[in-house]
């Protein structure tokens, strides 16, 4: 809600409250009787006067907008009209749609005080008021409304119905109009976590540890980026710099965020929840970061030149066999040597990302061999629907769901959920194990809109999801909005 809209709503509330107080005062003064029947008899005239005054105020206000709001003459009846509802613009997330209600008077009688209202299961399309006013015989009149769609709008099919009232006759309304809502194009966020220190990349009691998270946007721009670290270790750790923000990344651009924490009296490996997201597009990734602890850091020795890592060498996040494996080298690759801590080499790639290589898995070369790239960017699984689901609308009570899930890391499992008016339900659990997995399911639906979510996990916490709405027309009335229609526009699409 922008500031102007907030001011208008607050002002409208104040006017409504003032009117109710003034009306109550007038009725009490005009009633003046303890007996209820006498009180109601005395205030009837006052209510009529108040109604007439308000009617005059409304008529004058609409006249200022070019709308004639005169009441129909007593003898006016029998006029007929036809209403139509049109849309301009694509219903894309973050953009606007213009709705136009037109009333064609098809008779030789005039129509008065014509007004329409929309009915839809989509919250932004429901209860939109159109004040048309006077429509002369054989004439046509229109009114427009502009609707701004949420940036987190998901794919869904909706219908918009019309209710039109008029004095002096009847207006026929059209059948419900279908509208396909399209999601915003979302980026993929790749990221890499490095431990910034001058020794072993491990945690020692009393040490302030710095982490660097390199985030790269792929496919589409990413706005309002957030990188955050959450402590899972209680009082053993004090977070110092746990949240970092960045305004915008264009496709292919990278941003480095530095996070830090103080390790107190720690003896066991530390676990953190890492969140990487583009809040503007509703893209979120969650991951688990585990850092081994050593009581006494190994002494560090400097080194120069290149470290040539052997085929099969494992790049780790720290100098320990308990540290996370970032990548296994397929062929001999040169990295910049930064130092040696105990039996581990500390190296960096051509982008400055850090890793550790076991002493026996690399050797120093005094050469200008080009430095390689550590291909350890975490990349979420990709979920592709294998058909268009007939614009996300089915006539029956089941959805034939076919999807392909692919990943650069083994898929642990895939979950499918359905949310409807009766709540959220898990409808499928598919095991993984490989880099690809195919879904071919029959998902039971309930009448109306069903939110389908596919979640693919690479590990305990890291993965991605794809959500979309499917409309089951069996047993569903498009003229009746559902009780959840105001929450349909904002659901995260990635995890």
Image (cartoon, helix red, strand yellow):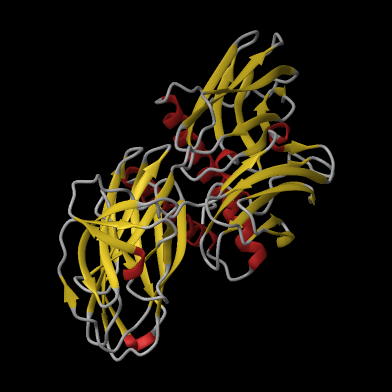
**77 sits to left or right of 339:** right
Residue in the foreground of this view, choosing between 10 and 127: 127
Residue in the foreground of this view, choosing between 160 and 349: 349
Q: Is residue 300 above or below residue 111?
A: below
Where on the picture, by quarter, is residue 264?
A: bottom left
Q: x, y percentage for residue 439?
A: 72, 48
Q: Is residue 317 visible?
A: no
**337 sits to left or right of 73:** left
Residue in the foreground of this view, choosing between 223 and 296: 296
Q: Is residue 282 visible?
A: yes
Where on the picture, by quarter, is residue 156?
A: top right
**456 sits to left or right of 444:** left
Q: x, y percentage for residue 223?
A: 35, 45
Q: Residue at image x 61%, y 9%?
A: 139
Q: Residue at image x 16%, y 73%?
A: 301
**245 sits to left or right of 393:** left
Residue in the foreground of this view, choosing between 205 and 53: 205
Q: x, y percentage for residue 97?
A: 51, 29
Q: Residue at image x 63%, y 35%?
A: 118
Q: Is residue 9 above or below residue 131?
A: below
Q: x, y percentage for residue 242?
A: 29, 69
Where on the picture, by quarter, is residue 71?
A: top right
Q: How many numbered marks are there?
A: 0
């Amino acid at each position: 809600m922008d500031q102007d809209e907030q001011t208008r709503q607050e002002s409208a509330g104040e006017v409504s409250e003032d009117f109710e107080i003034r009306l109550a005062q007038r009725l009490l003064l005009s009633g003046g009787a303890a007996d209820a029947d006498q009180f109601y008899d005395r205030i009837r005239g006052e209510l009529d006067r108040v109604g007439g005054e308000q009617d005059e105020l409304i008529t004058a206000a609409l006249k200022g907008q070019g709308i004639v709001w005169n009441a129909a003459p007593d003898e006016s009846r029998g006029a007929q009209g036809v209403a139509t509802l049109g849309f301009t613009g694509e219903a894309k997330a973050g953009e606007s749609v213009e709705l136009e209600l037109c009333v064609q008077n098809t008779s030789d009688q005039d129509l008065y005080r014509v007004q329409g209202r929309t009915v839809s299961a989509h919250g932004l399309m429901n209860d939109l008021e159109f004040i048309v006013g006077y429509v002369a015989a054989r004439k046509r009149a229109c009114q427009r409304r502009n609707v701004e769609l949420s940036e987190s709008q998901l794919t869904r099919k909706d219908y918009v119905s019309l209710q039109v009232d008029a004095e002096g006759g009847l207006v026929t309304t059209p059948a419900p109009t279908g509208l396909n809502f399209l999601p915003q194009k979302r980026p993929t966020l790749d990221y890499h976590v490095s431990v910034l220190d001058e020794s072993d990349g491990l945690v020692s009691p009393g040490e302030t540890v710095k982490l660097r998270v390199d985030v790269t946007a792929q496919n589409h721009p990413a706005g309002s980026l957030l990188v955050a670290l959450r402590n899972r270790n209680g009082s053993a750790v004090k977070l110092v710099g746990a949240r970092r923000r960045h305004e915008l990344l264009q496709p292919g651009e990278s941003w480095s965020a530095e996070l830090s924490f103080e390790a107190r009296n720690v003896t066991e490996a530390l676990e953190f929840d890492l969140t990487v997201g583009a809040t503007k597009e509703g893209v979120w990734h969650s991951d688990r970061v585990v850092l081994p602890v050593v009581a006494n850091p190994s002494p560090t020795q400097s080194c120069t030149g290149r470290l040539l890592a052997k085929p099969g060498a494992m790049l780790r996040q720290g100098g320990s066999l308990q540290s996370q494996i970032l990548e296994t080298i397929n062929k001999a690759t040169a990295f910049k040597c930064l130092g040696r801590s105990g039996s581990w080499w500390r190296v960096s790639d051509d982008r400055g990302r850090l890793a550790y290589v076991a002493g026996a898995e690399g050797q120093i070369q005094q050469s200008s061999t080009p430095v390689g790239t550590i291909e350890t960017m975490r990349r979420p699984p990709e979920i592709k629907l294998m058909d268009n689901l007939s614009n996300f609308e089915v006539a029956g009570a089941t959805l034939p769901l076919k999807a392909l899930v692919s990943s650069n890391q083994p898929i642990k499992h895939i979950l499918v959920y359905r949310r409807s008016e009766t709540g959220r339900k898990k409808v499928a659990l598919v095991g993984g194990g490989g880099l690809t997995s195919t879904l071919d399911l029959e998902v039971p639906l309930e009448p109306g809109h069903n939110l389908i979510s596919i979640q693919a996990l690479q590990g305990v916490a890291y993965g991605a999801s794809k959500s979309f709405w499917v409309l089951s027309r069996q047993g569903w009335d498009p003229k009746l909005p559902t009780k959840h229609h105001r929450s349909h526009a904002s659901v995260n699409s990635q995890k």
